[in-house]
Image (cartoon, rainbow, N blue to C red):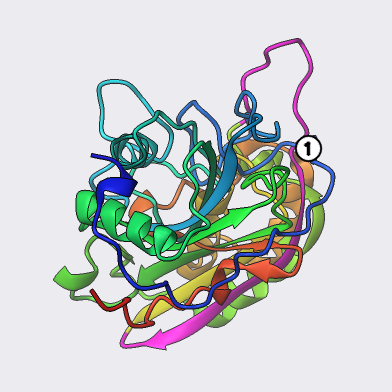
Amino acid sequence: MTLFDLPAEPDEPSRVDEPLPTHEPSHADESSGSAAPTSDASPDAEAGADAPGAEGTHRIRLVVAYDGAPFHGFAANEGVATVAGTLAEALATVLGEPVELTCAGRTDKGVHARGQVVTFDTAADLAGPGARARLARSINRMCAPAIAVTDVAVVADDVDARFSATARRYRYLVLNRVAPDPFLADRAWHVDEPLSLPAMVLGCDAFLGEHDFASFCRRPKRTDGVEASLVRRVTEARWTDEGDGLLGFEIEASSFCHQMVRAVVGTLVDVGRGRRRPGDLLGILRAGDRQLAGNLAPPHGLTLWTVRYPGWSTDDVALTRPAPEA
């Protein structure tokens, strides 16, 4: 059965179906989509990820949310369940053809996403009435409850989930109280010793701006004798008190290197514990030594929250809008 064998449904609610503007692909180390498994986001590029759609095909953009707990990361990995593998299998079944996925940010095992973006090419014509709604419904029925497609759009052939992105935002949750919360067990890092939120807030200042994040990244393997740059520009880093012991950390940058967000969170929690001072962090950054920074925060507290593109972001997708009537 393919998408076109499914019963017709009414047109989906109005969404962003116009092609996104794009910019020249960045050749910097990206927090992006690729074939090999990595972390919060990995530096390696996916073969053909920035190539336009082949003649006779259409480029499709999905916004995807998922629970990372059941998966060994986003990237396809033979023999284990992954987000990309599960999603690609469902798409192939519905569309009647194999698809190659490119994503905005590859997430590690246990890391979640609220606003992951995926692009792929297909010969199927999804511009017709109700076609995109039927695709989303079909994929969601096959992939529930761990994966949900929240938006489908037909875009220009040069729109690329990875290279067209201008910014990515991650969110990390820390539950700071004595008693754990079973309902947050796979969503927040439980830290039962007291943390100084003011100290952690002060520590964020060190990360703002452009820095070499070698002290906070897993350095990628060298393939051609040239080391990839670990310089990143962070535009926002902040903690908020969510109440009842729940602390939220958000960080935004054009891209992230491997394990960067979890290393930053682990180090800031050390500041909150009093093991480091906020003023120490700039020196750790400048040293370029991974051994000087803190341990990685656990993956289950991390969520890829938002991906931004010229004139559009995943925040524009209303997750709570009513489903189309059957």
Which one is nearer the viewer's eye here, 137 or 181? 137
For label 1, the residue is 28
Q: Position of residue 231 (x, y in %)?
A: 78, 43
Q: Which secondary structure, mark 1? A: loop
For image coordinates 50% across by 67% down, the residue present is 274
Which one is nearer the viewer's eye here, 106 or 46? 46
Q: Which residues are magenta?
A: 219-244
For image coordinates 31% across by 34% down, the residue present is 89
For image coordinates 48% across by 59% down, the residue present is 128
In this rendering, position of residue 184 left or right of residue 48: left
Residue 298 visible to an observer of this rendering: no
Question: Residue 157's image quarter?
Answer: top right
Measured along the vertical axis of the image, is residue 204 above or below residue 36?
A: below
Q: Position of residue 10 (x, y in %)?
A: 35, 73
The residue type indicated by label 1 comes to: Ala
In this rendering, position of residue 139 left or right of residue 295: left
The stretch drawn in magenta includes residue 296: no
Which one is nearer the viewer's eye here, 2 or 171? 2
Q: Position of residue 211 (x, y in %)?
A: 80, 50
How many residues crowd around disc 1 within 10 Å: few (fewer than 14), some, or many (20 or more)?
some
